[in-house]
Image: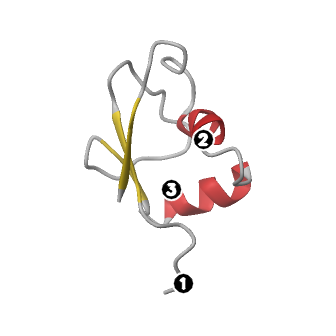
Amino acid sequence: MKKYIITEELAKTRLDKALKTLLPDKSRSYLSKCIEEGKILVNGKTSNQSYTVKLNDEIGVADLDQKP
């Protein structure tokens, strides 16, 4: 699982929008699906796409290219 720390420039944005900035090669709809499936964690816990990220939140992203 790759980890990202939310910086001041991304703080106070929705999780799906922050992820699109961190992972520009992935579509926002794909990232939203991954959030729903629990492949993306915020501070070690599942979340929803409308969660507003905060400064220093830790975003954990599973290997999204890996097939089940």
Report which residue position mark 2 lands on. 16
Q: Secondary structure at mark 2?
A: helix
Tell me where residue 20 sits by quadrant: top right
- Amino acid beneath label 2: Asp
Report which residue position mark 3 lands on. 35
24, above or below 54, in the image:
below
Specify the color scheme.
secondary structure
Label 3: how many Cα within 10 Å (few below 14, some 14–19, many 20+): many
- Amino acid beneath label 1: Lys
- Amino acid beneath label 3: Ile
The residue located at (42%, 63%) in the rendering is: 62
Mark 1 or mark 2: name the one nearer the start of the chain. 2
Between label 1 and label 3, give the one nearer the viewer. 1
The residue located at (62%, 54%) in the rendering is: 31
| Mark identifier at residue 67 | 1
In the image as oriented, which residue stretches furthest toward the bottom? 68
Instruction: Pinpoint residue 5: horizontal percent, then vertical percent.
Output: 37, 31
Label 1: how many Cα within 10 Å (few below 14, some 14–19, many 20+): few
Q: Is residue 40 left or right of residue 50?
A: left
